[in-house]
Amino acid sequence: MYIHVGGDIILPINRIVGIFPYVEEALPKDTLAFLENQTIQKTCIGNVTDAIKSVIVTNHHVYYSPVSTQTLYKRSTENVLDRLFEEEETNG
């Protein structure tokens, strides 16, 4: 299963560690330090000049997304539900 997180980025759901809302003024210092460290290590993907609404953390990268956490959640659950319905139809 995959999820479209914005732009031309599609991620396998099983590699996503977490999806977090991005409101820079409300982020804890530890989170900001983590994101800065990932930027320095060049593991961040996405355009930070765009309106960032969420941060997706995977096993190896951090993705900045213009898509809200609510929309990403809906996309991930819709994909799972679609697959379940497809399996039911296939299995009769």
Image (cartoon, grey):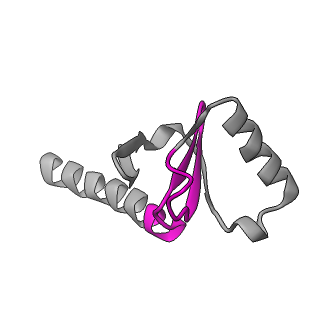
Q: Is residue 22 left or right of residue 27?
A: left
- Residue sitting farthest toward the right: 29
Indicate the quadrant containing the N terminus: top left, top right, bottom left or bottom right. top left
- Residue sitting farthest toward the front: 49
- x then y, percent, for residue 38: 70, 37
**Eyeballing the image, is 42 above or below 91?**
above
At 42% from the left and 66% from the top, the residue drawn is: 74
**2 or 86, nearer to the observer:** 2
- x then y, percent, for residue 27: 77, 63
At 42% from the left and 41% from the top, the residue drawn is: 11
**76 or 27, nearer to the observer:** 27
Residue 65 included in the magenta stretch of the image: yes
**Eyeballing the image, is 17 above or below 29?**
above
The magenta segment is 46-73
Q: Is residue 88 left or right of residue 4?
A: left
**46 or 49, nearer to the observer:** 49
- x then y, percent, for residue 37: 76, 37
